[in-house]
Image (tube, rainbow, N blue to C red):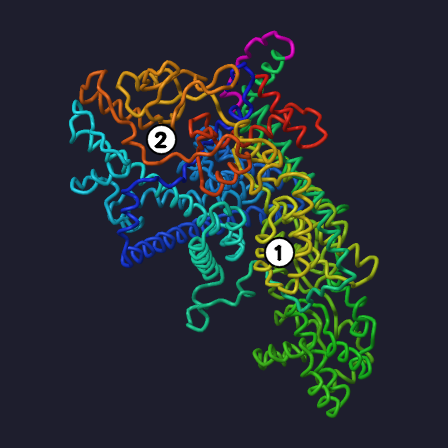
Amino acid sequence: MAETSKGKKDIAASLFTKYETIDFEEPDHAVLRLHYGNKTSFTKIREQLAHYALSLLMVVVISGLFLGLTYSTEILSEKRLERIRELVESNERGTATLFATGTAVAATIVPSLLVVFVAPSAIGSGMTDVIALLNGASSIDGMTLTVLAVKYVSIIGLVCAGLFSGVDGPMSQIGAGVAMVLVQGMLKWTWFRRAFLGETLDLGVVNDKGDLPVALQASRGSTTPLDNELGDDRETDLQEQELADSLLGFLQNNQIRLFATLGAATSIAVIFRAPIGGVLFAVEEATSFFELSLLIQLIFATICGFLIVAFTTFGIKERLPLKNIFLDPLEAALFPTESTCKQELRWSMLFTYILIGIVAALFGQLLNKTLSFVQKTRSKYLIDPETNFNDIAEKHHEKTGTHVPAKPFNKKLNSFLRVLEVAVVAVVTALIVVWLPSDETIDTCVSLKTPLAHVSAIRPECDFNKLDVTCATLSACKSVLDESGICFPSDYEHKFVQSVTQAYQVACGAQAASTATEGGSHSKARRAGEEKGHEEGASAETHSTTGSDASHSTGSDTSHSTGSDNSTAHASSSASPAEKFALSFNPHGGSELGEQMILSHDGKCYYQVRSLFWTSPERQLEMLLKRGMYNLWDAKSMGIFFVIYLMLSVATYYIALPTDLVVPNLIIGAAAGRMLGLLVNTIQPGHVDPGAYALLGMAALWSGTSGLVLTVIAVALEMTGDFSALPALIIVTITSAGVSSTLGPSLYHREMENNGAPYLPAEPNQLLRCITTKEIMHKEIVVVGRIETLADVKKVLRTFKYRGFPVVDTHFGENGIEISHKVLRGALHDSSDNIVQNHRPIGYVTRNRLNELVRDMERSQYPETATFDIESIIASSPMCVREDSTASKVYTLFRKVGLKRMFVVSQEGFLTGIVVRRDLIRPVLEAEENEKPARNLRELARSIKRHRQET
């Protein structure tokens, strides 16, 4: 456990053990400057072509993985759910229960074993690792090829088992990981690396004896000769290899981060069919290093991914003609808005939209805290109980001064308990999903007329279930259609408008028909119906002249029709109006929604709860967003679905599988929004389309839990194609994200805090604006001199376990004696915090480089007294800041430049300390840990300063 000099626990050091900071600082070296200076137009074009070629390869791989996931889970899940449905309809609920629980356990047991015993880092969404990577902190073992493979297999099992979780978070990590693996793999080929990095020099092996040694010496401003005992050639080769590793490391790190961003954005684009949403996700999460060149590559990658998935999903054969190469955005949308009912932003609704945002933010933060509690609880008692016990024992020791005896832990038993937990969650989920909807008292069969019952409230002139079909009633209905249309799904409205128009022509005579033709030119709905009628040709006439029974036999999507001949017109007095214009939903008409509904045996009614639960998450969201059918789902079914889905999604979170809650949050938000729409219509019948409120609820809750605004708006628009919802979406998302951010961090940021990711938000904590860099820096540092002996270097490595050491120039002690190196902890300051040694920093050397240096010198059998110029293997000049600078300035530099460390110097330029990423987070953690009362931020800053002086 990391401690301070007084033995007090270092909170930041103990938390951030699973992540390491990535160094994106550009090396200050003449060779790199020469590399940039020698670039030509041809070199830059070759570099761009290599980037786009690798981007396209990455897009193809990610799209292929997503399509493989989609098709495999659809086939397996549909067969499983279809079998459950058949057993329940055959009154074999016991067999259905055994089948559901058995298949759920079988689908999750192997993935959970892989997660627990092969790739423990595959747990959770993985989105936190992606966000942390873009922020400059890499998970030590979270993005390996093994983790990605286990995560992919586990997602398939999780979805096939019917667990209430999403795939977008894990797929984003897989996308980012695929991009990183491709970059690392392709750069091993020298010819591709030189093109990809735009190398004008072969940075892999810097061995140009004519130019590079001169450039290397000139970069240091020194002509100090190398140690003759080492041999010029050997040392020069070693220096050049270290230099190459440094320069390539910098260039590769930047490319890996860039392509990780492309991979994550592409995953979002293919999952939601939202290329702009993928771009904006990268913008909102990668703003610390965002560049214009990245934006262009993002657009290229996300659009390519979208086109691959769209063409594959909708059938490539139908898209082969050149005129159809670019898809209709609405046709390619994931959940297209198939309704002419557009949202109108009225002042009376403004308050409602703001209220939706506020409620979503409050509920979102409550949900975030609940999920964070679930994650912490599972971490304490199942994932890492030993660490939890040690923390409890340490706190007990601090309070009482007595030690708690060590408790033995059986790690294998604990691992099997985690697998057993997954099986229990799968069994409970299967039992609830099978038994609850199949209960006739809970899920009653609803009439097919219910979804379109809103017509009687908002268009009573066209409710021919209650009206006689006469010239007067048809004329009144036609007038309504001419002015404002009727709120139906598009295909329903087209046929209804045709039926009314043609019946009006017959009933009211030729003159009325002529008038109807002229007036119809002003009706958008009628124009759409006529266009569709021209396309259908004779088939449309057949539909219009048949009764309601014929509509079923011909496969039309509605059961409303009217007679168009004289005999039908004259029979209107004797025939029931319902037989002519039956405003009822026809699930047999071949529509996609009809195929998803679960009907009774006689096909005259449908089950709402079963239809919602016995399908995939994608189709659940599609049915909730369905427009133009106000009463497709009633308040009872929505309430049951909302509560059960919420409980099961929370119970599934952070089990030993790659779980994610973005898609469940979308479904929960859509269900809540649809319930609100039903409530509004109860107060004022037909006032709003519940499907439109479902879209607003989905977007509001997503913003409330994630803090995202631009991404949510773009994805919502691209998923549905309903651009009339843009004003309302802007209001609810900005309100929700704004209120939520003031109440607490987002779900992913809470998960990062629980995982110990040293994430730096866009804005520094207010506390950092009130303290100086001297108050947060590390004073206990170990330095090495520019010229060191082999024995001294080995002593430093053996004595201290730091990952690197500041390199200082030749310096003098109090007695004026020259010192070649200094390796005493806290030697820079005395008890009064005064500097007792004057060190001028010249760079930083990593532990790995010193180890390589020692191995090479020992391999060549050099004596312990042999010296080496450590400055020659340093490729970066130190980034320094004065100790009296405000800590928030250091914070900003860390994010903008991508620093791993920063030296703190006095006014004279002498080294006084060093700041790393966790030092910028430690003051906030200490303030929360100490919980000292403070009247304002300045008093809180003073208390922390006093605390540090005491320790």
Percent from the top left, x then y, of residue 71? Answer: 48, 51
Task: Name the residue beneath numbered marker 1.
Answer: 622
763 to 196, vertically: above or below:
above
- Packing grade of label 1 (10 A; few <14, some 14-19, many >=20) is many
Do the numbered discs 1 and 2 sit on residues whose CB atoms are within 8 Å?
no
**Type of residue at label 1?**
Glu
Determine the CA span between mark 1 and mark 2: 61 Å
Position of the C terminus by quadrant? top right
Q: Nearer the viewer, residue 85 or 918?
A: 918
Q: Which residues are magenta?
A: 399-415
Q: Is residue 400 left or right of residue 809?
A: right
The relative height of residue 867 versus residue 48 in the rendered view (above or below) is above
Q: Earlier in the sequence, mark 1 or mark 2?
A: 1
Where is residue 627 shown, x and y percent of the image? 67, 62
Could one spot residue 611 in this view of the protein? no
Q: Is residue 892 magenta?
A: no
Q: Position of residue 451 (x, y in %)?
A: 73, 61
Q: Which mark is residue 668?
A: none
